[in-house]
Amino acid sequence: MNIPGQKKKIRPDGPDKVTGNLKYLTDLTFPNMLYGKIVRSALPHAEILSISTDEAVKLPGVQAVVTYQDVPGFNGFGIIFPDQPVLCKNRVRYLGDALAAVAADTEEIAEQALQLIKVDYKPLPVVDCPEDALRPNAPRLHPDGNILHHAHYQKGEVDQSFQDCSVIVEETYELPRQMHAYMETEGGVIVPEPNGKLTVYVGTQHGFKDRFQLARILNMPETDIRVVSSPMGGSFGGKDELNIQPYGALLALATNRPVKIHQSRQESVRAGLKRHPMKITMKTGVDKQGNLRAHKVKIIADTGAYATLGPAVLDFAVEHAPGPYMIPHIEIEGFSVFTNNGVAGEFRGFGGNQITFALEGQMDRLAEKLQIDPIEFRQKNLRKANDPGPLGQRIAPTNGALEVLQAIKQSHSEEALVWKAAPTEKWKKRGTGIAVTMHGGGLGVDRVDPAGGRLSFSKEGKIEVAFGFEECGQGLLGVIEALVMKEFACEASDIRMVIGDTALVPVSGSSTASRATSMVWHALERMKDSFRTQLFELTQLVTGISADQLEMGPGGIWRRGEATTSTLCVSFSELAEKMPNGRSIHVHTSFNFPTSPDATVGGSHFLYAFAAVMAHVEVDLLTGKVKVCALDQAVAAGPVVTPLGYRGQIEGGGVMALGYTLMEEAKMEEGIYLTDNFDSYWIPTICDVPYQMNVEAIEKLIEGDPFGPRGVGEIGTVAVAPAIARAIYDATGCWVKKLPVSPEFLLKSISLGEMKPWM
Amino acid sequence: MNNGKELAAVMIRQGATMLHSPTVWLPDELVAAWEFKQTYGSEASFIAGGTLLQTNWVKNHAFPPHLISLAGIKALHGVGKELVHGETVIRIGASTTLQACRKESLLVQQAPLLEEAIRTIAAPAIRNRATVGGNVGGRFGDIIPALLAMDASLALFDGTDTRLVALSDWIKDSEPDRDSILVYVTIPEKSSARKEAYFYRKIGYRDAFSPSIVTISGYCYVNEEKKIEEIRLAVSGGTTQPQRLIKSEQKLISSCLTTEKKAIAFQSITAEFAAATDSFTTAEYKKTVAANLIISELMRLAG
């Protein structure tokens, strides 16, 4: 990837990560530390008749056992609705439900104590699919029934307009439950402080939100809880919700000793969030000229046992159901349904991946029926720069959709033809496919979505920049460093970055929804002038050189126009030393993520990123196996902040989506995971990904766009599956409508199962 | 217990001290290892590289109170040639690690199929620990089909004697003798004469570090008249025990690979391969893929 004018820069946390020096929060130990373990439900759905902890308490080395009786505050959590019990009292709704927690001198003693906790259950019928949950006679999983959320959007007269369509495609797409598969499983240490306060060293994507939820559970003032939330060994949405924090906190308070909990992979699979499995039915019609006329969508999402961000994920899928296409008549209906399966929630792409697979599948089927080139068909129907957003709302003008499509077409179409025509091994067929998407950033309209930051000049002479965001591997520190260096023309060594610690950082909102990069940029835009002015005033005071003669540069303050060619007026450290007592420089900002001024549907977006994907595949006709040979993406998300970080997000997202397309499925039967570890849940290895992936960044924004870089944390995952599916069709003539792609299905569809090739 | 050293096993699992550490016995003679097993019976398990056992423990399978390490027994080490019943064979000690097989020049030259099979197994860190004995003794290992194609035999120690058993016979036994110790594997030297006549294909859930869905391997020698003169076919995969496809071999021997023969072979392989449906793939798929792969390889050699 070439970004003119930008050198490849090593990320600040890179060397420590690749050399293994970095201490993650799960690596921490404290004097007198205990080990915590959590008893999870033995059944996916049952009434709890009794919980006996007597034997466990007696085991030597056990320091505390807690149950629902020991929750001092509200016994529940959940970012939107706190409907998940911290510790269940009379009912369990999935295998990850917690019943008790143990703190012991060693992990083994804690584990043995778990075996001594006796729970009597009365099994209840297991609701293991959303269709069953929606039946009138289904067991009610929650007081308000089995529908967590119902979302609806309508525009025009959809049923009537199908009558005017010359081609209609109707299809149901099925999407699997995907696991985040972060390298570091959930964990950390919770430390009681001498003053009755609590420090929580546990990775999360929103420290302040964890603090709020923990305060409610522990019945403590929020200000008595400090959450240290960085660094993390990956999250991808999976650590956004509370996981082990409440148990660690209850045990730490019960024992007045630090408690470490670090889930094993199996515990993580069992209790952790997953991507929502969805069934999406789409009926889409075009007129004779190939103009999209009508689009009817029904989404059923399996949200599992509890809410977490299930409602928001469904809203996102509903919003993105028309994607970047202009369709006059639309009806979209979505249901997020409770079951006794694993809890589904926040996951990179946030409902966009599922809906885009269906939408782009429709576009390809329509183009095929119309015998129009898929790129041409899309081009005809794509939004223009000033068109409204997917649900008719005003959005920041952008030509991203057409630009990414053009970019993929120009750089890849010819190459794809050549590749496809090249001789292959016997029994292999080649195909290529493209797909396009748009993806909203931020939490959307009508959601609490604050942002903010702080710039200070520290006593040590550093430009101290503080944000309430977390580094979960996405490259946040690299982004902050690059933006500050660019703005103030300083060196990396002039900067001190403070993140991921509620005691030290301002409220910036969550490190989710592709929003952190964008919000760091916005915050700096708001703070830079004031900070610079105050620094120049201080310099004038210290050196006597007029503030209007000054500019910032490497190591300190320079005379305007002379940075690096003459000597420093004053170095940052000297300036700090000479700062008069009582004087300080702190600039704060707080604001909200930009939203659409006229959006009517909660959660709909204002700022979008766009991507187009080109996939090359080779299908083995003997086995039905698919090999992705190329996966190139063009992305329009405004200026690139760090080229390596950008590329990492798009390539990494692409690989994650390749896994989603071809092999990943957290399979459940009767509410029980069949894939309980990485020896049955497959994520791609280096051998499964293309040798080289190309990323083309389209940095240009509409003239006068004041919104700067959009985040790229999710966009690289969204349009990959449909591009691969289209490539498979190109190779075999077989339409894939269910992920992960089943080699068995392909083998049957290409009619080779019955000895065809040998006849 | 003579010849044995006791070692308290620590650090077997991550975390602090174990509550109940197993005893690890370190015999340096075959007889001693066998005696330990007789003494502790089902309370004991032999251990070499430990890679398979470790995966089982993670799955909460019982951790035996006694482990009998085979690492120190010299008879299980080494790769070389030896004369058995007047025929030269290549002898691979059961303790030879999979990675060592890939480096051993005798094997690289004389049994390249083994290298091809090992390349598809697990990941480097596991291949550095896992042994030939464990892979074969576990009865589902991915080298078994390759060894079947090479007509390998096993040397098993039963407490007094070491006897040679054809791998194709041993694998048929559904109730294996758990107390015997696999000492070494032999491959007839003549196997190497027609290197190009061998094939091996493993289909997994992904392109590396995956258990097998279907593995096929075989040997097919075609004479000048394009007739199949010698043939051995082997299949395995996932939960399916490896097997020689004797009936299918019989249908193909002494014949040319005509279109009709291919159809017969397809039907025969799918019928003979005792594949089972599991949570991830159906028996039908495994059978079809095995037949497709075998016939495509036969076409390459005899088409």
Image (spheres, coloured by chain):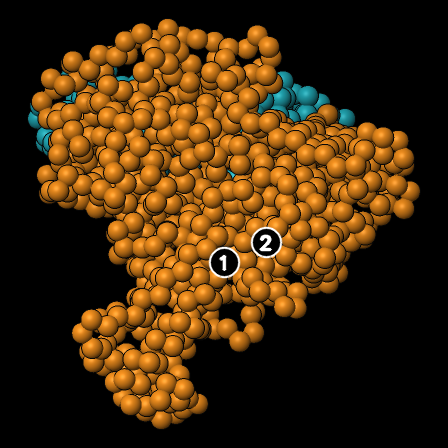
Chain colours: A orange, B cyan
Residue A670 at what x, y percent from top left? 48, 16
Subunit of label 1: A
Name the side, left or right, on which A432 lies relative to B13: right
Residue closest to the eye, A226 or A369? A226
Residue A247 at what x, y percent from top left? 26, 30
Q: Quadrant of residue A343?
A: top left
Looking at the rendered structure, the kind of residue marked 2 is Leu
Q: In the rendered structure, which disc, 2 or 1, sits on the residue that comes first in sequence?
A: 1
Residue A299 at what x, y percent from top left? 64, 29
Q: CA distance from mark 2 to mark 1?
A: 10 Å
Residue closest to the eye, A296 or A466? A466
Residue at left offset 27%, top offset 84%: A541
Residue closest to the eye, B286 or B247? B286
Subunit of label 2: A
Marks 2 and 1: CB-CB under 8 Å? Answer: yes
Q: In the figure, A433 relative to A158: above or below?
A: below
Name the side, left or right, on which B256 lies relative to B220: right
Q: Secondary structure at mark 2?
A: loop
Which residue lies under the disc numbered 1?
Answer: A518
Q: Residues within 10 Å of mark 2 (few under 14, many from 20)?
A: many
Q: Residues within 10 Å of mark 1 (few under 14, many from 20)?
A: many
Specify whether disc 2 shares its chain with disc 1. Answer: yes
Looking at the rendered structure, the kind of residue marked 1 is Ser
Name the quarter where the N terminus of chain A is drawn. bottom right
Q: Quadrant of residue B252?
A: top right
Residue A89 visible: yes
Q: In the figure, A180 relative to A119: above or below?
A: below
Residue A731 visible: no
Residue at left offset 51%, top offset 32%: A310
Residue B149 at what x, y percent from top left? 51, 32
Q: Which mark is residue A607?
A: 2
